[in-house]
Amino acid sequence: DVVMTQSPLSLPVTLGQPASISCRSSQSLVYSDGNTYLNWFQQRPGHSPRRLIYNVSNRDSGVPDRFSGSGSGTDFTLKISRVEAEDVGVYYCMQGTHWPPFTFGQGTKLEIK
Amino acid sequence: EVQLVESGGGLVQPGESLRLSCAASGFTFSNSWMSWVRQAPGKGLEWVAIIKQEPIETYYVDSVKGRFTISRDNAKSSLYLQMNSLRAEDTAVYYCARHMNGIDYWGQGTLVTVSS
């Protein structure tokens, strides 16, 4: 199974400051069709997960442009350019290249300092 | 608007069974791959099972193989998860989820508690 490792697991950030979350996979996530199936999700307290990014860097509809995804192969990053209060929650990466099973990172808890 | 509404969760004893349902709307259900994903209290996300559209194929995480069965009724736009021989470690919120370039939509979840 592909192991997804996120860091940090806890991320205190000052409002208006940038934030960055790393996600590393135990093997390359490039699929035979050339795509890389790496998603980022946000889960606000008491809510279901919401997808922010698909295929490494594509923002979902309605996601603010302060969120961006980057990376390749086994190394991926989610960046928030300026953290707002509504960004509090847990962020997960997920790989959909080598399945079953689909695998998630452990989650990164973002909080406001 | 895509909507996924789960139901069927509850409190059961170890060894008992439960059937979860997910009612889908706002998209062509019959064309979509669908999954169940669970989240134990205070823990992270764990993918449980997936079902493709015709021809039907199903896959499971190792920990539920032989105990859980995922199925679908395209005429009713519904997804199901039959859970047998439930264990305490199956306690979680179970989410129904649609696949499109990974998982794009999630339901609100239904809580399954396995306890004596």
Image (cartoon, coloured by chain):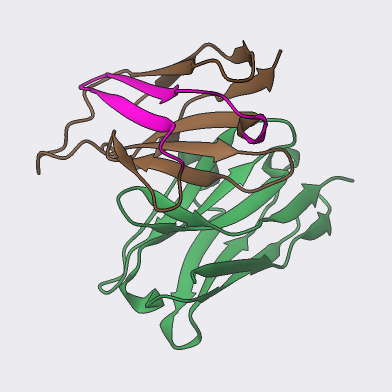
Chain colours: A brown, B green
| Camera-nearest residue between A60 and B18 | A60
* In-image side of A110 versus A3 (left or right): right
| Residue sitting at the far bottom | B75
The verdict on residue A74 being magenta is: yes
| Residue sitting at the far left | A33
Image location of residue A92, percent across then percent down: 50, 31
The image quadrant that residue A63 belongs to is top left
| Residue sitting at the far right | B116
The verdict on residue A10 being magenta is: no
| Camera-nearest residue between B63 and A89 | A89
Image location of residue A20, percent across then percent down: 45, 16
User: Can you see residue B16?
Assistant: yes
User: Which residue is drawn at the image coordinates 65% and 36% (left, top)?
Assistant: A86
Relative height, residue B1 to residue A43 (above, below)? below
Magenta-colored span: A64-86
* In-image side of A12 versus B27 (left or right): right
